[in-house]
Amino acid sequence: MGPEQKSICPATIEMLKKAGTDGIQTAFERSGDLRPCPIGSQGTCCKICAMGPCRITAKKKDEQEEPLGVCGANTSTIAARNFLRMIASGAASHSDHGRVVAEVFNEVAQGHGNGYEIKDEKKLYQVAMDFGLDIENKSAAELAKEVGKLALQEFGKQDGQLTFIQRAPEKRQALWKDFGVIPRGVDREIVESLHRTHMGVDQDYKNIIKHGTRTSLADGWGGSMIATELQDIMFGTPYPILSKVNLGVIKSNMVNVIVHGHEPVLSEMIVQACQDPEIKALAEEKGADGINVAGICCTANEILMRHGIPLAGNFLQQELAIITGAVDAMVVDVQCIMQSLSSVAACYHTKLITTSPRAKIAGAQHMEFIEHEPLESAKAILKEAIENFPNRKVKPHIPKDEVDLVAGFSHETVNYLLGGLFRASYKPLNDNIINGRIRGVAGVVGCNNPRVVHDNAHVTLVKELIANDVLVLQTGCSAMATAKAGLLVPEAAAKFAGPGLAEVCETVGIPPVIHMGSCVDNSRILMAATALVKEGGLGEDISDLPVAGAAPEWMSEKAVAIGHYFVSSGVYTVFGVSWPTLGSEELTNYLFDSIGKDLGGKWAYEPDPEKMAQMMINHIDEKRKALGIDKARERVLYDMDMRRELETQ
Amino acid sequence: MSDNFEKKENYAGEHVDVLGATYEEGKPTGKGIGRWAHKLEDKDDILYYLRTAERYWYGQEGEKS
Ligand code: SF4
Ligand code: SF4
């Protein structure tokens, strides 16, 4: 299969050709060479004890006995245990990120920010109110200390409920309470997931998935939401900002520093350190025209949203950025970082610098990012990159592709944009959903996966949705895919959106596809959905809304955690690529159907993005029908000619 | 962010305060374009905004349906 069959992104195709010429192997080739294990991919390989691994398949028609593991575990138990472990790992990743942010926040609150500060007092008051603090009579500094302490306690709480659960619609909270899935503490639910999935513990697939629900809620309404909120307080709540995306943002005459990973605690400081006169002077001294910071994966989204720093690319472009020969340092922290970067970097002059004690890579240079001395750490890293600029081995080959995008839509900014400072409200959005100009809202998120054509499912799905008047909210690598296709600018509304959606976008001045941030910022989508419910007119719960979710090119366990907290919050959620429980018909039927009776939301799987779009639109239309707004059409305003015509009839 | 009231005369000839224009004046320009939250100047402004604009979570009203 040639590069043109592997991606729809022109810069990616160009770099894959260069990789071939340079003799570099990438994830695109490895995925072709290494076929997925058919049993593992359908979720029925168990290796949690040394009596196994037990690789079992579903009962065939001519088989009398149900295939079982050595301990007697059936396919439903094994697949459910694996599914819960995916949720737990995803929730742990988002939440450990949230914990680091909370720790840094506490340092700032204690007056030891060392470069970090409280930038957004408004968000601080919001979170302080969530925690029930007396905001009237306390200063911002006093509140920050209390918020920091309480936020950190959310991770280790043993009972009660996570604070942000109370942000959900009242009916949803009642459903969670009745079903017994309100998370007590972030860490507690994750630890219990690992206990329950140990050999010989929870062996009832529905009960296992029920704890998956509790654990995923501890992520979406817990660890992820804490990360988003505290980051907003320290780094600023995003506002609309113009930037660029794709490998063309790498500049041959500048020191190129690619930040890759997830935690803005590092990337924010890199951005700040670039402004340092000493650093700028050093870059000039080495013959560069300056320092160019660009991002890959979600750390890119974080600094894009708050500073307009360009996006070099999404998950599958990480190796390709180095193959340009122009990346002087790739600075990584945690999550979604391929080990292959080390060997690809070794073929060029690029320094791969790991910065987190939790994520080292053999062959990479480790420069620990010290949170007590963030600016010094960032400057030291930048100096390594600058010193490396004269060491470029080959003339850089950088694709020309770079595309404009507008990002920075927090749910608060959407509220503001819809009504202004004096009348900020979700009402215009609700009204336009009710009158049918906007058919519904879809959250399209998640990764890239070389098992499918890079970016194709994201772009096809989103184009289909907006053409059918569905407003799309995005995060993660999915937002980067559609940004590269030119969908994240206001002009895209006239070009790609259906007439109703285009009219609303033109009036408000927003793109038809709204970039809401990184993977932890999926919590912003939960808040936007809650605002739609609380504004009124669209039912009493998220499950009543004409909304749907999708991750068409998912690969990460974090995507499963996100998908499950959307399902658990009442959203119909469709995944592409492959589905990790297909080895158990019983469990798959539960997740795709009867879980809806428990939670209001349910899962679906469809690798074809056009069919996926149709499934989401069908769901949206069903919800519109249930709300009695399926017939709603825009009121026709008759002009005088039309009246005369009517009178003469 | 005080509300803008105008003095008017009602039909009985009494003076009344009528709410005036509430749109934001001018066109957004310059670098910080889009940085809307900076328009909230002090704590009172912020808290007023949160209780009205972010009423879904911080207002006095309950949920509508
Ligand atoms: S727990 Fe049971 S199914 Fe899993 S590896 Fe051990 S014996 Fe096999
Ligand atoms: S969307 Fe997926 S690949 Fe991209 S940063 Fe998030 S988890 Fe990683």
Image: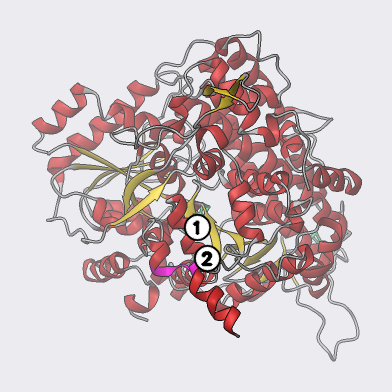
* Residue A69 visible in image: no
**Please, what secondary structure does the residue beneath circle 2 have?**
helix
- Residue at 54% x, 60% y: name it: A471
Instruction: Verify CB contact (< 8 Å) between mark 2 and mark 1.
Output: yes
Magenta-drawn segment:
A495-499
**Please, what secondary structure does the residue beneath circle 1 have?**
helix
Residue A412's x, y, as percent? 55, 38
Outermost residue toward the front?
B12
Label 1 neighbour load within 10 Å: few <14, some 14-19, many 20+:
many
Write down the quadrant of residue A390 in the picture: top left
- Residue at 72% x, 41% y: name it: A218
Q: Main secondary structure of the magenta part?
A: helix
Mark 1 residue type: Val
Mark 1 sits on what residue?
Answer: A504
In the drawing, what numbered circle is on residue A500? 2
State left or right for residue A157 relative to residue A479. Answer: right
Mark 2 residue type: Gly
Disc 2 residue lies near ligand 2 with CB under 8 A: no
Determine whether A502 is above or below A356 in the image.
below
